[in-house]
Image (tube, rainbow, N blue to C red):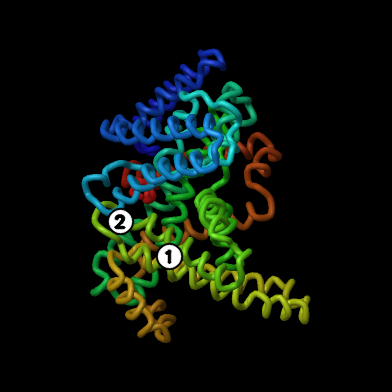
């Protein structure tokens, strides 16, 4: 059930109505039933896998709670992780296991639950039904955020209540997420699809435009889902973690991946892989190895889809790992240079140059993410590189269409909003604005979605992972 479908809006209205009518202590049970309905309505077999993972997690966590011996507890944790992550690995490689939408997301949630249970970070004895709700929570199950149990469970156990302030913020977030998805992402998608479908025959300028457009398509598609998930959760009194923080304003690739893009996944890898491997505590060479391991695993997490390893995703991960190596190797040099020239370090010109450089490095890596193979990605980059010096002349002669101008205008609007949001949250700005301005902004967004929106044109990109 897509967030952009009429069926979802009807489903959400019914779930909210029943939720409001129930006493707070019973609401979690209704939301669990609604989450299973949401996840299983399009493909009932989804529920078999979700149910199996849930049973493994609950049984393992209960056993960890009762067990005191260190060796036995480690064995229980290892067994649970092997089952959950082994099933995830199988879904990446074998077609028979690859039909479960969102499995990557709730499998990582399940793994974090087991690790937190082992470390005794869970809030006391967790009822089985509320643990099941954590894994199945319908706004996040298909594409995150990868919420942690210690943050989610206290909200579910304390009784779910939605105050007016959260409801208003939730509606605003969901509206903004829908706008990013159906207006921006899905209007950029056709241009991107056409060029990448004929990469060997498309002109270099078409390929270059498509790379830029894809960078904003994937951002608006994925962050749009996250905004809707967080916004819808707020309607039920559930606060999910932030998943995107204006990533294309990052000043380095380390800031992009560590603080701004898919934050929940980045923190998952940091806390459950990078730090357990030794992080930066075991020497510089070990730190380099740990960083590359994280990005290679991230590549594998995106790869597969049931047809063997998608090596272009692995290359994408390795390339971003190399970016981190370069940043780590030059960090002390740039720190000394900044100390020697503090006015240059604080200048807006340098800030803009750093943001532009970071954006282009990330956009370059997106080519491997979007291309069908490593060979196709290299072909695209070679064709653009061979004509790079001629790009200004080619651009001036390119026959732009209304579709291109619409896409460029939408990107410009997004960038303007992101810059304003970086200085002060747009939602706080709206809260402080006159009522006429607040309602006018909402009506304008709705009108734009009705006029330009491509409803149910395509599923969210990250639902396939």
In this view, 368 is above or below 336? above
- Identify which residue is drawn at 56% across, 73% down: 285
Task: Using the numbered discs, state the Cα–Cα distance from disc 1 to disc 2 in whole angstroms.
Answer: 14 Å
Instruction: Indicate which disc, 1 or 2, sits on the residue closer to the N terminus.
Output: 2
Left or right, 234 with reference to 220: right
- Identify which residue is drawn at 54% across, 31% down: 65
Q: Tags 1 and 2 in contact by the CB under 8 Å rule?
A: no
- Identify which residue is drawn at 27% across, 54% down: 93
In this view, 97 is above or below 408? above
User: x, y (%) of residue 373?
Assistant: 28, 67
Residue bearing the label numbered 2: 304
User: x, y (%) of residue 274?
Assistant: 54, 58
Q: Can residue 12 be seen from the camera position used here?
A: yes
- Disc 1 residue crowd, few under 14, some 14–19, many 20+, Cα 10 Å: many
User: Observer-nearest residue: 188 or 102?
Assistant: 102
Quarter occupied by the N terminus: top left
User: x, y (%) of residue 293?
Assistant: 47, 64
Residue bearing the label numbered 1: 317
Q: Can residue 450 be seen from the camera position used here?
A: no
Q: Which mark is residue 191?
A: none
- Secondary element under disc 2, as helix, strand or loop, is loop
- Secondary element under disc 1, as helix, strand or loop, is helix
Left or right, 166 with reference to 209: right
């Amino acid at each position: 059930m897509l967030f952009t479908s009429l069926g979802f809006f009807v489903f959400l209205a019914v779930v909210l109505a029943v939720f409001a009518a129930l006493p707070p202590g019973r609401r979690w049970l209704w939301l669990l039933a609604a989450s299973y309905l949401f996840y299983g309505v399009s493909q009932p077999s989804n529920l078999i896998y979700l149910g199996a993972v849930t049973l493994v997690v609950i049984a393992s966590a209960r056993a960890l709670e009762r067990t005191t011996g260190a060796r036995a507890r480690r064995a229980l944790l290892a067994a649970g992780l092997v089952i959950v992550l082994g099933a995830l690995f199988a879904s990446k490689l074998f077609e028979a296991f690859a039909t479960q939408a969102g499995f990557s997301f709730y499998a990582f949630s399940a793994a974090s639950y087991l690790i937190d249970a082992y470390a005794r970070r869970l809030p006391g004895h967790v009822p089985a039904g509320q643990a099941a709700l954590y894994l199945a929570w319908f706004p996040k199950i298909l594409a995150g955020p990868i919420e942690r149990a210690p943050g989610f469970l206290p909200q579910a156990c304390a009784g779910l209540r939605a105050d007016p302030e959260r409801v208003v913020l939730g509606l605003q977030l969901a509206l903004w997420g829908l706008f990013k998805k159906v207006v921006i992402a899905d209007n950029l998608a056709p241009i991107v699809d056409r060029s990448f479908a004929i990469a060997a025959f498309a002109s270099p300028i078409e390929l270059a435009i498509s790379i830029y457009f894809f960078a904003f398509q994937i951002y608006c598609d994925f962050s749009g889902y996250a905004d809707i998930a967080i916004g819808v959760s707020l309607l039920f009194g559930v606060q999910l973690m932030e998943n995107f923080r204006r990533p294309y304003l990052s000043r380095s690739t380390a800031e992009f991946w560590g603080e701004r893009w898919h934050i929940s996944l980045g923190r998952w890898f940091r806390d459950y892989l990078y730090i357990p491997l030794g992080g930066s505590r075991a020497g510089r060479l070990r730190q380099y190895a740990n960083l590359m391991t994280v990005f290679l695993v991230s590549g594998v997490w995106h790869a597969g889809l049931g047809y063997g390893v998608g090596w272009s995703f692995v290359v994408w991960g390795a390339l971003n790992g190399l970016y981190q190596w370069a940043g780590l190797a030059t960090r002390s040099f740039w720190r000394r240079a900044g100390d020697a020239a503090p006015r240059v370090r604080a200048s807006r010109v340098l800030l803009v140059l750093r943001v532009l450089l970071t954006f282009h490095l990330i956009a370059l890596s997106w080519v491997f993410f979007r291309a069908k193979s490593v060979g196709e990605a290299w072909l695209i980059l070679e064709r653009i590189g061979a004509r790079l010096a001629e790009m200004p002349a080619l651009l001036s002669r390119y026959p732009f269409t209304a579709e291109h101008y619409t896409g460029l205008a939408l990107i410009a609007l997004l960038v303007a909003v992101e810059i304003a949001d970086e200085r002060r949250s747009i939602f706080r700005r709206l809260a402080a604005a006159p009522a006429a301005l607040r309602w006018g902004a909402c009506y304008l967004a709705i009108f734009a979605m009705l006029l330009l929106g491509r409803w149910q044109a395509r599923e969210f990109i990250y639902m396939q992972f």
